[in-house]
Image: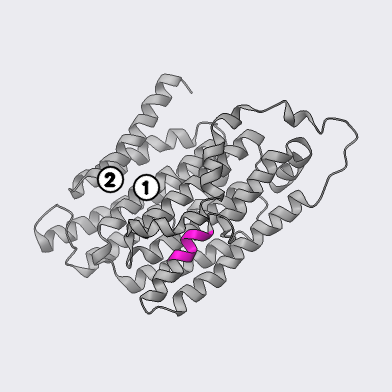
Amino acid sequence: MNPLIFSMIMTTVILGTMIVMTSSHWLLIWIGFEMNMLAIIPILMKNYNPRSMEASTKYFLTQATASMLLMLAVVINLLYSGQWTITKMINPTASIIMTLALAMKLGLAPFHFWMPEVTQGISLSSGLILLTWQKLAPLSVLYLISPSINTNMLLLMALTSVAIGGWGGLNQTQLRKIMAYSSIGHMGWMTAILIYNPTMTLLNLSLYIAMTLSTFMLFITTASTTTLSLSHMWNKMPLITTIILTLMLSLGGLPPLTGFMPKWMIIQELTKNQSIIIPTIMAITALLNLFFYMRLTYATSLTMFPTTNNTKIKWQFENTKWMTYMPPLIIISTMILPLTPMTVLLD
């Protein structure tokens, strides 16, 4: 893609998200979503082939439907409140339709079907944008309307998302699909705590973006898209492969790592609000995520493929560019669990 065109498209994507996050007028928010959606499609089709075209079409149809539902909710709210500004949504129908539209944009269950297919059909760099940057705008609107969201419906979607995020990844060998199902599960954790403590949702989002960004950048460095290609990397670049596996265990929420922090705090906050069954179910279903990450770790690091050459030390002299910018992200993604008490200051 021409660098000038690419820079213009990326600027539009960023500008659309910024408009959504900074606006207090429903029409501007809808315009920001539309700008973002129309600009991201050429990025998804960057490596043009039938698979990426199919993925982009699925993404467009899903997001266009969600935008239509969002505008319907805005119009219903306008009829009852008489204003375009973001205030507490008086009409319960408008609140429910708005929540469904934002859930569809985020890929929350039961509107999750598009996310694994779209992520699998695009390149790793486009998948990185889809699973990180594209979450900011819908979550910011959910954050703004959280006082008027239907609690039971959102908790049901959150529980379903955590369960599907675990079950869906169990039989996957494609790394992009595994990351997509991981994203569905993390979105479930974020929306479950949104009603009780929105600040904790922002903390979870920040850590999720850091972990996903690190993992995808290392996938791009090693050109790994399947479990098999990742296991072959162990002979060529054991250090990078070890870091990838540590990051994936952190995404799964293994206790010594950073990914355990948001789950721990969310379970604690839900328990404080006299909710015992919901965090118990979420913790049990989160073990499914941890299982397929552990299985991936086993398949990659505990099985050594035989080699007949002496190139096992070549990794020490190649692919060193990533060392200049990855260490801070890796530290944030794996080692900040001891800083958990400091996050109490955010509340």
Q: Is residue 312 left or right of residue 296?
A: right
The residue under the point 19% across, 46% down is: 27
Q: Secondary structure at mark 2?
A: helix
What amino acid is at disc 1?
Leu
Q: Is residue 123 visible?
A: no
Q: Are marks 1 and 2 in contact (CB under 8 Å)?
A: yes
Count of numbered marks: 2
Q: Horizontal and vertical percent for residue 304?
A: 83, 47
Say few, some or many: other residues with alpha carbon within 10 Å of mark 1 (under 14 / 14 to 19 / 20 or more). some
Of the pair 301 and 56, the residue shown nearer to us? 301
Residue 238's quadrant in the figure? top right
What amino acid is at disc 2?
Met
The residue under the point 21% across, 45% down is: 23
153 lies above or below 165: below
Residue 261 in the magenta stretch? The answer is yes
State the extent of the magenta-drawn residues as a range: 260-265
Q: Is residue 32 visible?
A: yes
Q: Horizontal and vertical percent for residue 290?
A: 62, 61
Q: Which residue is mark 1?
A: 136
Q: Horizontal and vertical percent for residue 130?
A: 46, 44
The residue under the point 61% across, 59% down is: 169
Q: Is residue 233 left or right of residue 286?
A: right
Q: Horizontal and vertical percent for residue 8?
A: 36, 26
First-in-chain label (1 vs 2): 2
Residue 280 in the magenta stretch? The answer is no
Which quarter of the figure is the C terminus placed in?
Answer: bottom left
222 lies above or below 342: above
Of the pair 272 and 307, the residue shown nearer to us? 272
Q: Which residue is mark 2?
A: 21
The residue under the point 71% across, 43% down is: 230
147 lies above or below 317: below
Residue 15's quadrant in the figure? top left
